[in-house]
Image: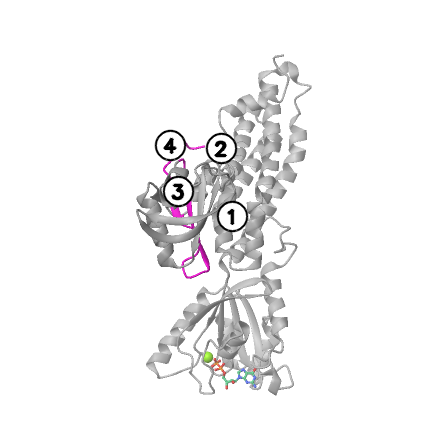
Amino acid sequence: MIKNSDTIAAIATAPGVGAVGIVRVSGDDAIGVIGRVFRPFPGDMISHKMYYGKIFRDDDFIDEVMVCYMKSPRSFTCEDCIEIYGHGGMFVLSEVLSTVIENGARLAEPGEFTKRAFLNGRLNLAQAEAVADLIGAKTAAARRAALRQLGGGLSHRLKFSRDKILSWLAHIELSIDYPEHEEEARNASEILGEADAVINDLQKLAETVNVGKIIREGVRTAIVGRPNVGKSTLLNAILHENRAIVHETAGTTRDVLTEEVRVADVPLVIMDTAGLRETNDPIEKIGIEKTHEAALDAELILYVADATEGLTAEDFNTIKSFSKNKNILILMNKSDITSGHGIQGDGSSVLELHETEELPPCIPISAKTGEGLEELFSHIRDLFFAGNIGTGGETDIITRERHRILLAQAITHLQNAKRELHEGIPEDLVSVSLRATYIALGEILGVEIGDDIVDRIFAEFCVGK
Ligand code: GDP
Ligand code: MG
């Protein structure tokens, strides 16, 4: 518990108008502050009970509210906490907040409530990050991953590995310092046997960062193709709204439109772009330039072609110009007015290319009727959430670069330890590598190995009895 901390306050609900809005106050003087602004003040407030009353600034009646006191440590921050439930307009809420601040609280910094929860041991660092992720979650998958991390799924998994490493360290130190207890100490080969499983587990966890990043940030997706093939119609169909102007005139879309949407649980940041063609229109030219930039930046390209015309040589050249390792799906649009697959296109050169080059998956769709969209969505899901990494709540997923870097460090140190054991390098050197692994994993949770660790190690054994 941090002592002598300021009492902080902030509006806890989202900006905007709602039926109810909450001002949160946390710190040693939370009760003192509320006592100066809330009438009738019940004096001895009972924890976790709602009180009805009014907020006053001197004799000015500010709002009619409910107030709840959460006594330390049974609150989000582990400190004394007060929540004031007022009317949900931004003006009235900011009046309540400024009244509270004039009466002894200080305006909280961003994230300060969660920071206090972490400093007070209520949450570890990974869980504190999960709070931020949960608040920022835009999809069900992101929410589930954050909830799981908040619930301690990731922490348990890391603690399991850390405990293993700690017990190896204990045995190594035991055999160094008390060679007469050698029979209690496990030999290198036993540790070697277990190390692989831990490395394996950490590697699996590290691999989830891609899914984690997608869940947090979305897949940058560009809809690209020649004019009039139905790109804007496709965007509207995916969004279920008329976001982009659709018109039979070629060159309608001139700017990049960006929207966020979720398909088959995959969050997409999707961009509709100007159709690619030769043009003399200076504005359209700029638009086409932006299309190229969007395609370059995208992690997924939805290349739309007109099935009634087939895949033209121009289409092929554009597709070929995209980087080989990009995810590309070719969508043969307007399948409602054509029967075939439509890849044949406009000439033999196309067919040759088709035969010699590896063509990205080709999906017939109709942006107009919605035909084929489900298939498109399941393709997208397979591309990004393939394998056994589910997006359900059952899998631990790391969502942050910080976690990935620390996991990579931990894996390297552990591999070093393994190699050192293998080569018969003195055990005190091996324990340096093991400690480094332990520290890196601890940093993910925000805990570090301290001097007391030595005490803990030996407390496990009956040495010195
Ligand atoms: P963009 O230039 O690629 O953005 O194409 P638009 O979305 O503006 O569409 C161009 C024209 O094609 C419009 O008249 C649309 O109504 C039509 N269109 C788009 N998708 C389809 C489709 O799936 N089927 C049919 N029949 N027409 C479509
Ligand atoms: Mg368009």
Name the amino acid type tagged 1.
Ala
Marks 2/3: CA–CA distance: 38 Å
Q: What stretch is highlighted in magenta?
A: 1-28
Q: Which of marks 2 and 3 is in front?
A: 3
Identify whether 5 is placed above or below 301: above
- Distance from disc 4 to disc 3, alpha carbons, whole Å, reads 18 Å
Residue depth check, mark 4 versus mark 2: number of the one nearer the observer: 4
Q: Where is residue 441 in the image (x, y as percent from the top left)?
A: 53, 38
Q: What element carries label 4?
A: loop
Position of 118 relative to 52 (above/below)? above
Can residue 353 be seen?
Answer: no
Report which residue position mark 1 lands on. Answer: 130
Disc 3 secondary structure class? helix
* Residue topped by disc 3: 34
Report the side of 298 relative to 376 (left or right). Answer: left
The disc, 1 or 2, on the residue closer to the chain's N-terminal end is: 1
Which residue is tagged 4?
4
Which badge, 4 or 2, comes first in the chain's sequence?
4
Q: What residue type is labelled 2?
A: Glu
Q: Which mark sits nearer the N-terminus, 4 or 3?
A: 4
The mark nearer the N terminus, 1 or 3, is 3
- The nearer-to-camera label among 1 and 3 is 3
Task: State the residue position of label 2.
Answer: 448
